[in-house]
Image (cartoon, rainbow, N blue to C red):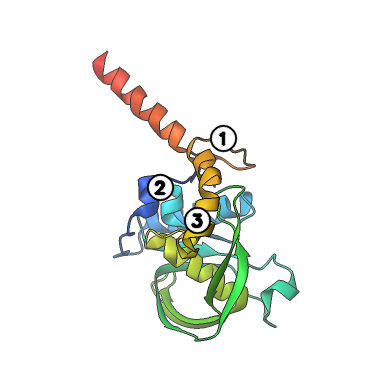
Amino acid sequence: MPILPIYAYDHPILRQQAHPVQDITDAIRRLAENMMTTMRNAEGIGLAANQVGESQAVAVVDISGVEEELLRSKFNVPPMVLVNPVILAYSDEVSDMEEGCLSLPSYRDTVTRPEKIQVRFYDLTMREHTLEAEGLLARVIQHEIDHLHGKYFFDYLSPVRRAMAHPKLRRIQLGQVTTEYPLFTAKQQRASRSAVRRSYHS
Ligand code: ZN
């Protein structure tokens, strides 16, 4: 199962609305499997399809390796593939937690989000599920669904916090970050574009 490069800030696909999946094809199943492998390789707990360059409403979540005190739930949550996920309801209760993102390496900040959600999604057999999630699971699902709507976690921060993050975001954009997983940065995007131009003119 190949490990896919993870698209970094500020690739345009990360600001786009993902297309709803019409049908579970072999390509979608393969994408979900590759996303699972890619997420685990990067030691992430969630990944959205546009983070690997596919504008499809598919996300994977696996918090099974997270320590219990962070989970705030008593049951084990199996790895999940969420196709066309929609949040149906949010709790009024909110919580703060530090978040990171595989597309934003070496940048973390505290994000306030609803503590509980009700989410509807389809699995890879196109069976519909409605899930009540709370704590870390609710947070990861919200973070991934945000990606599918072209949103980053820093969009929730105050203008001051965002301004403080600007140098870090700039470094990511310039590819001045090192990761333990393959990253597709804006710098590489420019290089591949100029390679195309060169071959076009030759
Ligand atoms: Zn993310």
Q: Looking at the rendered structure, which numbered label has been put on residue 109? A: none
Which residue is pictured at 46% across the width and 46% down the height?
9
User: In the orientation shown, which residue stands out farthest toward the front?
Assistant: 160
Spatial CA span between label 3 and label 1 = 19 Å
Q: Is residue 49 above or below residue 77?
A: above
Q: Is residue 80 visible?
A: yes
For label 2, the residue is 53
Q: Where is residue 77 shown, x and y percent of the image?
A: 62, 75
Q: Is residue 190 above or below residue 82?
A: above
Spatial CA span between label 3 and label 2 = 25 Å
Spatial CA span between label 1 and label 2 = 20 Å
Q: Indicate the secondary structure of the residue bearing disc 2.
A: loop
In terms of depth relative to the viewer, which is nearer, 142 or 163? 163
For label 1, the residue is 176
Q: Determine the image quadrant of residue 100.
A: bottom right
Q: Is residue 31 above or below residue 22?
A: above
Evaluate if marks 1 and 2 touch, with contact meaning CB atoms under 8 Å apart: no
Mark nearer the viewer, 1 or 2: 1
Q: Amino acid at mark 3?
A: Arg
Q: Amino acid at mark 1?
A: Gln
Q: Is mark 3 within 8 Å of ligand 1?
A: no
* Mark nearer the N terminus (1 vs 2): 2
Q: Where is residue 126 shown, x and y percent of the image?
A: 38, 72
Q: Indicate the secondary structure of the residue bearing disc 1.
A: loop
Mark nearer the viewer, 3 or 2: 3
For label 3, the residue is 162
Other-residue count near label 1 (Cα within 10 Å), few / some / many at <14 / 14–19 / ≥20: few
Q: Determine the image quadrant of residue 36.
A: bottom right
Quadrant of the frame with the C terminus: top left
Q: Amino acid at mark 2?
A: Gly
Is residue 73 rendered to the left or right of residue 36? Answer: right
